[in-house]
Image: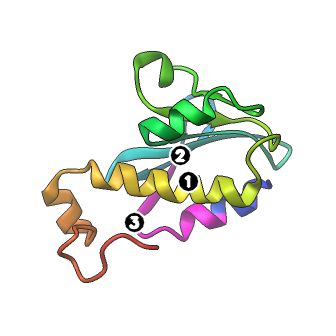
Amino acid sequence: MTLDAFTAFCESLPHATYVRQWGDSHVWKIGGKVFAIAGDENGEITGVSFKVTPIAFHILKDQPGCQGAPYMASRGMKWIQRFSDATMSDAELLTYIRDSYRLVGAGLTKKMQKELGLSPESPRGFPS
């Protein structure tokens, strides 16, 4: 996947913000909380880390092209790093990024969710 395609997708998620940090990583956040981290080389994504459900973590962590995300998974967090498309296509990766966005958004304070228009009672709710 190209960095441009990844960036365009993340930019399309409401209230997503971008910062370069942690050794030049491309970091995407919602409400100040990280939902995706990507590295690139020559405009191509070399790896993407994202939050998953416990069951998805259990399934994906040992699949070819995936592993528990360095640092995050070693601290008990349910984050996966996809470093090749051996198991997960680019389209599937984007679905997992959207799910990560929703998981992180759901973990924000109720006040922050309301400010961003993401609370379940909000007419906009989380994007599909």
Task: State which tag comes first along the sequence, 1 or 2.
Answer: 2
Residue that numbered label 1 is attached to? 97
Residue positioned most to the right: 42
Could you classify mark 2 by the number of other residues whose Cα lies within 10 Å: few (under 14), some (14-19), or many (20 or more)?
A: many
Estimate the x, y position of residue 7 in percent, counting from the top left: 65, 59
Residue 12 belongs to the span the image colors magenta: yes
Estimate the x, y position of residue 84 in percent, counting from the top left: 80, 38
For the magenta stretch, what is the residue range? 8-19
Secondary structure of residue under mark 3: loop
Q: Which mark is residue 15?
A: 3
Q: How far apart in space, not on screen, are marks 3 and 1 (Cα)?
A: 14 Å
Q: Is residue 68 above or below residue 36?
A: above
Task: Kindly indicate whether the residue at mark 2 contacts the one at mark 1 (C-beta within 8 angstroms).
Answer: yes
Residue that numbered label 2 is attached to? 36
Task: Kindly indicate whether the residue at mark 2 contacts the one at mark 3 (C-beta within 8 angstroms).
Answer: no
Which of the two marks, 3 or 2, is nearer to us in this view?
Answer: 2
Estimate the x, y position of residue 46 in percent, counting from the top left: 77, 38
Residue positioned most to the left: 111
Callout 1 amino acid: Ile
Could you classify mark 3 by the number of other residues whose Cα lies within 10 Å: few (under 14), some (14-19), or many (20 or more)?
A: some
Which of the two marks, 3 or 1, is nearer to us in this view?
Answer: 1
Callout 3 amino acid: His
Secondary structure of residue under mark 2: strand
Task: State which tag comes first along the sequence, 3 or 2.
Answer: 3
The quadrant where residue 105 appears: bottom left
Estimate the x, y position of residue 119 in percent, counting from the top left: 22, 67
| Residue 8 located left or right of residue 34 | right
Q: How far apart in space, not on screen, are marks 1 and 2 (Cα)?
A: 7 Å
Residue positioned most to the bottom: 123
